[in-house]
Amino acid sequence: MERIMGLDVGDKTIGVSVSDLLQITAQGVTTIRRESKEKDFKALEDLIKEYNIKKVVVGLPKNMNGTLGPQGEKTMKFAEKLKNKFHIQIIYEDERLTTMAAEKLLIEGDVRREKRKGVIDKVAANFILQTYLDRQGRI
């Protein structure tokens, strides 16, 4: 059975989350430090193969009024390349509040600021994917 991947794509990092085999829960997997497009896609390719990914849920940063800004356009370009390179389905998930929700969760969990910076993107990717999974009504 295949899993679904969740991505929080930023300029410096890509947070990665993967669903369980039943596609009920999301688990944070890693944070990819962005160095070059080649390395970014190689790291993602390895994860796509390892977890048998056929569908990727990408967090789409929108402005609070729902419009797409420059960061949203960059994210869509990145996702389109991912789709064409690996022949996988891309689903966009509104991510306006995910980083704030991830930060709040980590603060409530008493995670120190230095540690939060290292895991925030992975946790945000988790929120993005879990939101999608919950909406699929599989719970």
Image (spheres, grey):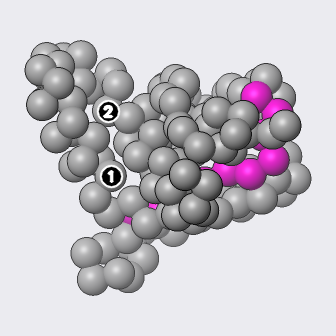
Reading the image, the residue beneath label 2 is: 120
- Check disc 2 and report its element: helix, strand or loop: helix
Q: Which residues, given as a range, are shown in magenta? A: 51-61
Q: Is residue 113 above or below residue 97?
A: above
Q: Position of residue 108 (x, y in %)?
A: 12, 31
Reading the image, the residue beneath label 1 is: 98
Q: Position of residue 69 (x, y in %)?
A: 39, 73
Q: Position of residue 55 (x, y in %)?
A: 74, 51
Name the residue rendered at 17%, 19% in the picture.
111
Q: Position of residue 117 (x, y in %)?
A: 26, 26
Residue 85 seen in this snapshot = no
- Check disc 1 and report its element: helix, strand or loop: helix
Residue 57 covered by magenta stretch: yes
**How far apart, in angstroms, are the residues tagged by discs 2 and 1?**
10 Å
Dot 1 amino acid type:
Thr
Name the residue rendered at 64%, 33% in the picture.
20
Question: Which is more toward the observer, 33 or 121?
Answer: 121
Circle on res. 115: none
Residue at far front of view: 139
Dot 2 amino acid type:
Ile
Name the residue rendered at 43%, 66% in the picture.
94
Question: For the stretch drawn in magenta, what is the main secondary structure?
Answer: strand
86 with respect to 13 (left or right): right
